[in-house]
Amino acid sequence: MSVTPDVSLRRWWNDPGEYGWLVAFLEARGLSTAMKRIVAVIGAVLAALAAVMQLGPRVNEDPLSRILLVVVVLFGTAWAIRWWRWDWPRSVRASMLLLAAGDIGIALAALVNSDPLAGLAGTPLFAMMGAYITFFHTPKVHALHIALLTATIAVLSAWLAVQQGHGGGWFAASKGGIALVVSIGLLPLLHYGFWIMQRSFVDSLTDPLTGLANRRGLEEALRSLRTDVDPEHLLTAVWVDLDGFKSINDKHGHLAGDAVLIRTARCIQDCVPPRAVVARLGGEEFLVMVALSRAEAASVAERIRRAIATPTHPGVTASIGVATAEPGTDGHFDVLLKCADDAMYEAKRLGGDQVVQAA
């Protein structure tokens, strides 16, 4: 029976986002450099426009406005250099700080004009930031962005209405409305559509019962995990197979069996490093792929064994096999998987509830 994914507006609004996954997705496919260059161009355009404004007649002559415009030029230049030369921001916070600075820079560039109509003409630059948010941030961040651009356009429209005098309100409202439509456009709708596609793709990589990666999700996650492998921290496979799981289903029913699988998944996640990839391979089998030394791998596997064996009802134990790539190899997934599988079966032959590390 197929399960229709929840793509309601409520879930979209409350979704925490997949920023880290999206960045890893781009990097794994060699697309991050091209995307960084596009984002860098946004800053370069902003800096160029602000520099041209310095030479034009429609900038307030007071020193503060001139200083603010210089700040915008410097910021746009720094933005372009940062995105062109350095890696993509690793954290959501760093990305949001850059985004906020960009929004504020555009708002300042629009507000320092001596002519509000010229200021309104510059507000479509907000659409560039909105496009970035559409792909990398949540609807709540998009709402903050829209609030700032709306406030900027409202100030410029009110200024224009006062400047036009009697009957200028309708003129200002029409110009402000056009600027608002151009700046926001269909981006919120595109954000929702992109989220639906992203959610469907992410859900296709996930085991619906435990929330862990499935086989397809495991292969996808390994693309970014391989970049962490170095001579001291080798690619390691930890294969976990529950002992006597069929008897739990037979004695206590499938709902109890599902509860054991969910509890096991949580135990494994609690015992592994944050960058580890944890997958359910099917049935009662789980796999952890992580970059560790041999000693660390054995320690992590033992923690998993103890956590699973913690007395519960119904109780369960696990046989665990550990395999670590040899130094100087690239740690092929299939080879590691077979070695970990063989070590796990050796643990079962020895009676279960123990860890065996492949030689």
Image: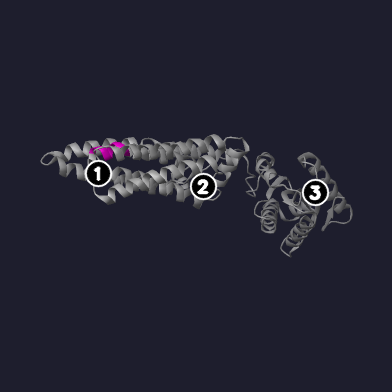
Q: Which of the image's four quarters has the N terminus? A: top right
Residue type, numbered disc 1: Leu
Please check the rendered image and state whether residue 340 is part of the magenta-colored stretch, yes or no: no
Q: In this view of the protein, which residue sits in the foreground, 96 or 236?
A: 96
Which stretch did the figure color magenta?
117-122
278 left or right, relative to 19:
right
Q: Pointer 3: residues within 10 angstroms few (<14), some, or many (20+)?
A: many
* Residue where numbered disc 3 is placed: 324
Q: Position of residue 351 (x, y in %)?
A: 87, 57
Q: Earlier in the sequence, mark 3 or mark 2?
A: 2
Q: Pointer 2: residues within 10 angstroms few (<14), some, or many (20+)?
A: some
Residue type, numbered disc 2: Gly
User: Which mark is on residue 30?
Assistant: none
Question: How far apart in space, not on screen, are marks 3 and 2 (Cα)?
Answer: 33 Å
Nearest-to-viewer mark from 3 and 2: 3
Q: In this view of the protein, which residue sits in the foreground, 197 or 127?
A: 127
Please check the rendered image and state whether residue 121 is part of the magenta-colored stretch, yes or no: yes
* Residue where numbered disc 2 is placed: 17
Question: How far apart in space, not on screen, are marks 1 and 3 (Cα)?
Answer: 63 Å
Q: Is residue 294 above or below residue 23?
A: below
* Residue at (38% x, 46% y) in the render: 103
299 left or right, relative to 190:
right
Check whether the beta carbons of the residues at disc 2 and disc 1 lie within 8 A of each other: no
Q: Is residue 299 above or below residue 4?
A: below
Q: Earlier in the sequence, mark 2 or mark 1?
A: 2
* Residue where numbered disc 1 is placed: 156
* Residue at (32% x, 43% y) in the render: 109
